Image (cartoon, rainbow, N blue to C red):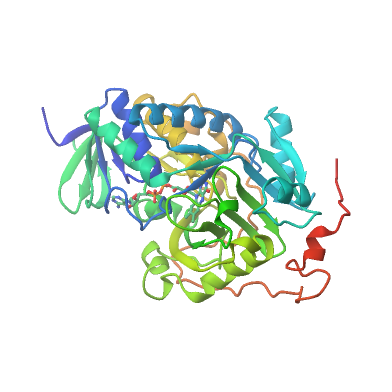
Amino acid sequence: MNRKHFNTIVVGVGGMGSATCYQLAKRGRRVLGLDQYDVPHMKGSSHGYTRIIRLAYYEHPSYVLLLKRAYELWRDIENVAAEPLLHYTGSIDAGSAESLSFRGALQSAVQYDLDHEVLTGLEMAKRFPGYRFPHDLLGLFQPQGGFLVPERCIVSYANQAMALGAEIHGRERVLGFDRANGGGVRVRTNRDEYTADSVVVTAGAWDRDLMPMLSNLAVPERQVLGWFQPNKPHLFQPSNFPVFNVTVPEGRFYGFPIYGIPGFKVGKYHHFQETGTPEQLTTGDNEPRLDDELVLRDFISRYFPDADGPTMTLAACLFTNTPDGHFIIDQHPQLPEVYYASPCSGHGYKFASVIGEIMTELATLGQTRWDISLFRADRFGVPTSELFRDKGPAPRVSTSHHGDPFASGGHQPPQRTKAPADHRGPGSPDDTRNPRYWQRDEVSTFW
Ligand SMILES: Cc1cc2nc3c(=O)[nH]c(=O)nc-3n(C[C@H](O)[C@H](O)[C@H](O)COP(=O)(O)OP(=O)(O)OC[C@H]3O[C@@H](n4cnc5c(N)ncnc54)[C@H](O)[C@@H]3O)c2cc1C
C-alpha cells in the first residue's frame, strides 16, 4: 500500500475539519487530516470555550432542517466520546419587535413548529434575574438552545477519528494542491507530499489563501470575546441563565453563563469591523486592547449590571464572512475532486457536526442528500461547479442582514471603525442604563 496515498485529505482540523475526519473514518475511508497549528489551537475561529446552538434560526429558515440533523449528530459524538459537549440552557433571541433577531427567530419557530415562548424585557428579568433588558424589548425563548464546547468537540472528533484509523497531523501546513499525475489530487505541505482521491478544504479564515477565487468572498474579521466576573455570580449559571443574541441600539451582542473559565462571557457581532489577514488581525497591536474591553463593558453595564465586575479574560478570534452572511459550501470549479466549506459568518459552529456529514458525502459520493443550494459559490459570480451545473441558476444574492461591510474585503490592512456615538447620555429617558428605560411598560407588538 502507498502510505502517502489517502482516500480523502482534510485540510484544516478545526471545527469543521475535525467533524469531517470523523465522518470519513466512520465510513471506512483512509483519511489524513492536516492542520498548520496544534489540534486544537487558539488562533482560528473555534476557541473560547462556548458556542451558541439554537434551533429557531433567524439567519434563514432553511438552516433549521440542517440544525435538526446537527443536534442528532452532536448527540452521536457525545455518546461515542462519552463526554458532554452540548449543554442545554435555553436560548433567547431578543430585540425590538421589528428586529431581525427577534422577529426572524419567531418566524422560524412558528414555521417549523418549534417549542418557544415570547417574553418581554420584564418577564425575562423576572425569570432569569441576571437579565435586565428594556421592557419594550422582546425575546424568543427556546428551551432547546444552549451551548457547545468547541475545543472539546474538536478533541472528541479528532480522537474518535483516529480510533477509527484516521491519521491526523498537527503543525503541518498545506502549501497547495493540484492534479496528481495518475489522477486524484496532489497535496504539498511544509513537511511532505501526499496524494488523495478527494480533498476537503476546511481551512476557515485561511480558505482564501488556498483558493484565491474566495479572496473577496471569505474575508477574515477580528472579534473579541470578554469574560467579566459578575458581582452576583449565582445569577449567571448554566442552570438559570440562557445564552442570548440581542440587538440593542449599541449593536448586536451575544453572551453565555459562566462556564469553563471564570466570568460571564460576551461578544459584539462584527466588533470594530476590522478585516485583514488572520495573522494581522490577532497579533501585535491586535492582541485584545482596552478599547475592545470598553465596548463590551458598556453593554454589560446597561443590560447585565450584576455582571459588571472585574475583567477576567479577553481573547481575539476570527469570523470569516461572506458578502451575504450565508455559508459557502461547494466544489472547486477547476479541480472537481476538491470540495470546500466556509461555514462561518459568525454563526457556523453549531452546524459543524452536520457539515462533517455533508463534506463526507461530497468527498465520497460527489453529492449530498442535504439541500446546500443556498450555499453555492456561484451566487457571487465564481464559475459554477460541476456539482451545481445542472441545478439551475444560483440563488439571488440578498443584502446581508449583517449590513455587509465585507463585500470588498480582499487582503486589506486592519481598519478600525469607531464604536457608534452614544446619543443616550446618562439620565436621559433613552439612557438604557437608566432603570426607568427598561421599566417602561409600553410594549409595541407586531403580531
Ligand atoms: C468570537 C466568535 C464567536 C462565535 N460564536 C458562535 C456561536 O455562538 N455559535 C456558532 O454557531 N458559531 C459561532 N461562531 C462561528 C464559528 O465559531 C465558526 O463558524 C467555526 O468555528 C468555523 O470553523 P472552521 O472549521 O471553519 O474554522 P477553524 O476552526 O478556524 O478551522 C480552520 C483550521 O484550518 C487550519 N488551516 C488553515 N489553513 C491551513 C493550511 N494551509 N494547512 C493546514 N491547516 C490549515 C487552521 O489552522 C484551523 O485549525 C463564532 C466565531 C467567533 C470567532
Q: As drawn, which residue projects farthest toward the right? A: 442
Q: Quadrant of residue 334?
A: top left
Does 155 appear above or below 25?
Answer: below
Number of numbered labels in the structure image: 0
**Residue 14, position in %: x, y?**
36, 46
Residue at image position (27%, 26%) is: 29
Q: Which quadrant would the C terminus be assigned to in this image?
A: top right
Q: Is residue 335 visible?
A: no
In the image, is 137 to the left or to the right of 31?
A: right
Q: 126 or 160: nearer the eye?
A: 126
Q: Is residue 429 visible?
A: yes
Residue at image position (78%, 64%) is: 435
Q: 3 or 309: nearer the eye?
A: 309
Does 246 appear above or below 28?
Answer: below
**Residue 173, position in %: x, y?**
24, 52
**Residue 182, position in %: x, y?**
19, 33
Q: Quadrant of residue 353?
A: top left
Does 156 appear above or below 204?
Answer: above
